[in-house]
Image (cartoon, helix red, strand yellow):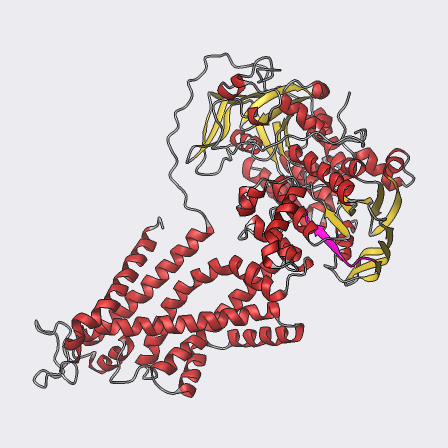
Amino acid sequence: MRNRSGLAGLVIVAALAVLAVVGPLVWGAEAERMDSTAILQGASAAHPLGTDNLGRDILARVLVAGQFSLALALAATLIGAVVGTVLGALPAVLPRRGARLVTGTVNALVAFPGLLLAMFVAVVTGLGAKGAVLGIGAAVAPGFARLTQTLAASVAGADYVSAARMLGVPRHRILVRHVLPNIAEPLILNLSQAMGASLLALSGMSFLGLGVQPPDFDWGRLLFDGFPRIYVSPEVALGPAVFIALAGIGFNLIGDALVKAARRAAVLAPEKVAAPPAAEQERDPHAVLEVRDLTVTFPGGVTPVRGLSLAVAPGEIVGLVGESGSGKSLTAAAIGGLVPYPGVVTSARLDLDGELAMVFQEAALNPALKVGGQLAEVATVHQGATRAEAWAKAVDRLGHVRLPDPARNARQHPHELSGGMRQRAVIAMGLMGRPRLIIADEPTTALDVTVQRQILKLLREVVEETGAAVLFISHDIAVVGELCDRVVVMYAGRVVEQLPADQLKAARHPYTRALIDSLPDMSTDRSRPLASIPGRQPAPEAVGDGCAFAPRCPLATARCQAERPPLVDDVACWEA
Amino acid sequence: MRIENLTVRYGAFTAVDDVTLEIPPGAIVGLVGESGSGKSTLARAVSGLVPHTGRISDGRRVQMVFQNPYASLDPRMTIGQSVAEALLRLPARERGAEVERLLDLVALPAKVMGSYPRELSGGQRQRVAIARALGAEPELLVADEITSALDVSVQGAVLNLVRELRAELGLSILFISHNLAVVRYVCDTIAVMHGGRVVEEGPAERLTTEPAHDYTRALLAAVPRLTT
């Protein structure tokens, strides 16, 4: 737990736990010792928090009461958690009608005020510690049941549960083996917060006289006893009050910290990365984008992009191809300045001549806003246009990307358009400025082939019309080969080959060749097995000194294992 | 196995509209179409995962392999435990050897039994999912876009495996994909779905060289190809 409030919570709860164990052993006798000469005293050196109506030392009683208070809270929480989890999980195994009955009951209980439920149960089961624990347990249970139900429903829709159902695995076994283990984590996180709430509620019950009865005592009971004297000697009530508050805060801090830790893995401070020595080379005056020695590093030695160099000429369509984990999307993000924290970008040169537009997948549109408004925002924010001007421009650009009725489409929400139309709108958003370079990251991956073909045609038209260059990022070498002028192939964070798209079938790097051979096309010989590449791409933190592809390469020699081939004459291979 | 007049409705929307399809024993039948064509709904109906009307004859033992091998294996179970779920009919002490045999069938070493899904690559996970489905001794295997979540370099190996399994085990397979080139390579016959209906059906070679329906022609024209 790397956060201060979580640590504070941990310290508080640990201290209370120690108190609960040693308190009665050390101060037990003192707490019970009556002294008729010292009845109802205020604070003094002998009794820092004063004495009660039987002359017992209140500080000792507060310290001893910790054990009982915490034990009651723990019991109530466990009762609530177990009953709640069972209620929440039952609908998954019961037949349909039984499941509905349980769900309905839980819904009704969730709607019922918790304290009322607790008091009702406490009164019915008998005044005292047992009744209070059962009451608070009953109040905690509906929340757990609802949480379990919601979590279980999301897991029940998972493919692995469908697979188990198809295999004929019985329902109770699916619940125990698949559902419960996968929802345990959030349920356990909830326990800590429920513990804090139970402790407060139990103290509340005792304070109201509905909980612990004399001669037993917990913090709530001590507060109840001290309360009538609060105007005369406030310290007698403050002692138990402070401990109740402290315990509530401690458990809640831990709960919050656990939830936060579960939501995102701890973010480490970025490591310092020495910039590579700036290569003293003249910049290419004809390139719209020139990148030299681009490196993206994440903490822990994870380096997804390693010394990548790339140049794009005006009006050129360059395809950046690679499998997942090759670093192609992070390369695009680095050029656009969008590498997420804590990534560190270094480069010897990163020159962009003119405006840049990023085109993402169609899912990049905000579903809650009108399409036209999202486009117009670009013009009002970046170009200082008035709202009317910006809207007119948005409609104009939507017409440019061949939407059928731009004025009407601009007033529609994204869900009213088809996937292909949404992708056109995203491209139109990139055209709101005057981009010299358009970076398109997998813009057709989610689309059907017939729609993909239209979008590729549109991209080519945009290039012809505006003279902008395109860096097209894709995992699909066939799509890249069809659209692009030039193809740059990435593997494990580096460029392994670049070549004109019409030369792809004559590629020299064994990885490029294997990629092309493993892709069936409409003329593949159906009587022979497809080519495939054994093994897998090394993870960004596991790239060694030699050629990253060597372990999978049929041509690899001892030299390939030991020494990384530089990109010479557009190919990085010793054997090509 | 024969699917007759199969229809799936979600409220007023008809996802699969009166589809009749024959899957001969030991054949791989391909189902192509775009998103919303009803091909995945048909797969789920045949696998018994969505309610439908119509008749499926001799379809008692159907197993399905899902698109995303990252979602179809329980992250908290070892590979051995996942595959063994298909073998609950066997006494517990015989399951280990059978899991080993199934993994061998999909060309995975026995040592992956103790691994968790996160330790395997996408291609290896998809092999595990296939091994698990084979453990239930299916008469029909439904493969729903099983290579579309995989990297290109391992896609070929999984497609080869599908063809080998058919040759070795005489398995009948309903192979669903949006990628015509993949379907053409793997399947004996192809059915093209559009708007919930099968618009054309025929042997793979003929359907891809002499398409009869306009929609099939449009699909064929849109397949990206490398020039030269």
Instruction: Decide which of A484, B89 is in the foreground and name it.
Output: B89
Instruction: Examine the rendered structure and indicate whether residue A315 appears above or below residue A60.
Output: above
**Quadrant in the picture for the C terminus of chain A:** top right
Front-most of residues A510 and A554: A554
Q: Is residue A329 left or right of residue A396?
A: left
The answer to which of A350 and A493 lies nearer the viewer is: A493
Q: Could you tell me residue A159's position as x and y percent?
A: 64, 53
Q: Which residues are magenta?
A: B58-67
B61 in magenta? yes
**Where residue A402 sits in the image (x, y, percent)?**
75, 37
- Residue B68 visible in the picture: no
Residues A298 and B119: in front is: B119
Q: Residue at x 75, y 50 (%)?
A: B141
Q: Is residue B88 visible?
A: yes
Left or right of A545, for residue B3:
right
Relative placement, left or right, of A277 versus A39 is right
Residue found at x 66% / y 47%: B131
Residue A175, image x, y percentages: 57, 63
Left or right: residue A365 compared with residue B224:
left
